[in-house]
Image (spheres, rainbow, N blue to C red):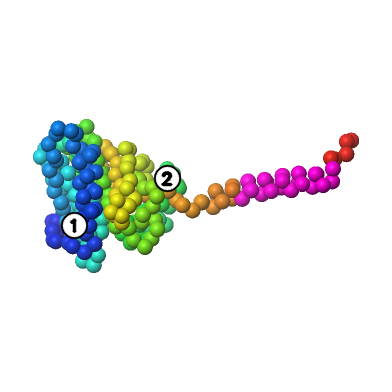
Amino acid sequence: MPQNKKRTVTKRSSTALRLVQAAVLAAVLVPLGSVAIESSTIYCDTGYGACSGTFSPTNTSNTWKFTDSIDGLLYTFTLSGQVSTAFTIAVDDRLTTQSAELANLAAFFGNSVCVPTRNPGSCGIFDVFGSDGFVSGLYDLEIAWFSNSDPLSQPQNAYILQSKNGFHPIWTNQLTAGFYFPNPTPTDPVVGGKGDSFSTFGVFTDNPIPEPTSLLLLGTGLGAAWYKRARRKRQSRNGPPPVS
């Protein structure tokens, strides 16, 4: 497994994005009167293999920051939760498109579209490898990204879908207890949820454009309503029909 490539990244990095992440994690994971959690940051060059992060009872939050040499920081992937034993998890990112995911969404989330978290038309998804030591297997997952010129990069709603089919994902469930902040900074959307197993994850939103079948049903309904209305008008002009 490739070693982590750590470096200082300034381009496109956002102090506000980090503050939002810290605030969300603190609200979710640190009850009143408890000690603050410790965390670590792993810098990963996007597209160059998985980066590993080790959890321990004193390190309950890891953030993978995916970067490249052109745009700097692209998006972040944060896992956290109460830890019972030390363990290591590796996270890898890759790109997909909505057209590539149509068949993978059809059975369970046919009205969903992937959020272009990388750039217009390109959606980042994340493969997570390794068994976990979170208490009860539960973890919190948070994904943050930079909005771009694609309107869908900052949608009105967003959620994290999970697939257990590996490199060819079939999206089968949505993380529970989800939250979404579309414009906290105001340009760094962040979405989160809870899960109990690792596999492949992606950020999705509801399709703002009706599917062809929906359009057909809508057109049929409007046509029937128009016909009934026109028939009533003709009857009112011509008087009641003759009685046989």
Residue 16 locus on image (x, y percent): 23, 54
**Looking at the rendered structure, which numbered label has been put on residue 109?**
2
In the displayed image of the protein, which residue is found farthest to the bottom?
Answer: 70
**Looking at the rendered structure, which numbered label has been put on residue 26?**
none
Left or right, 27 with reference to 118: left
Going from N to C along the chain, the mark reached first, 1 or 2, is 1
Q: Residue at x 24, y 53 (%)?
A: 17
Q: Which one is in front, 202 or 73?
A: 73
Q: Residue at x 84, y 46 (%)?
A: 238
Relative to 43, residue 175 above or below: above
Estimate how packed mark 1 is, as few (under 14), some (14 to 19) or many (20 or more) residues with alpha carbons within 10 Å: many
Residue 8 locus on image (x, y percent): 14, 61
Q: Main secondary structure of the magenta part?
A: helix
Q: Residue at x 32, y 37 (%)?
A: 177
Left or right, 103 with reference to 169: right
Q: Any magenta on residue 85?
A: no
The alpha-carbon separation of the residues under discs 1 and 2 comes to 30 Å
Amino acid tagged 2: Phe
Q: Which one is in front, 175 or 155?
A: 155
Q: Which one is in front, 139 or 144?
A: 144
**Looking at the rendered structure, which numbered label has been put on residue 44?**
1
Q: Which one is in front, 176 or 35?
A: 35
Residue 92 visible, this angle: no
Residue 185 visible, this angle: yes
Q: Any magenta on residue 220?
A: yes
Specify the segment rendered in magenta.
219-239
Mark 1, secondary structure of its residue: strand
Amino acid tagged 1: Cys
Q: Residue at x 45, y 47 (%)?
A: 110
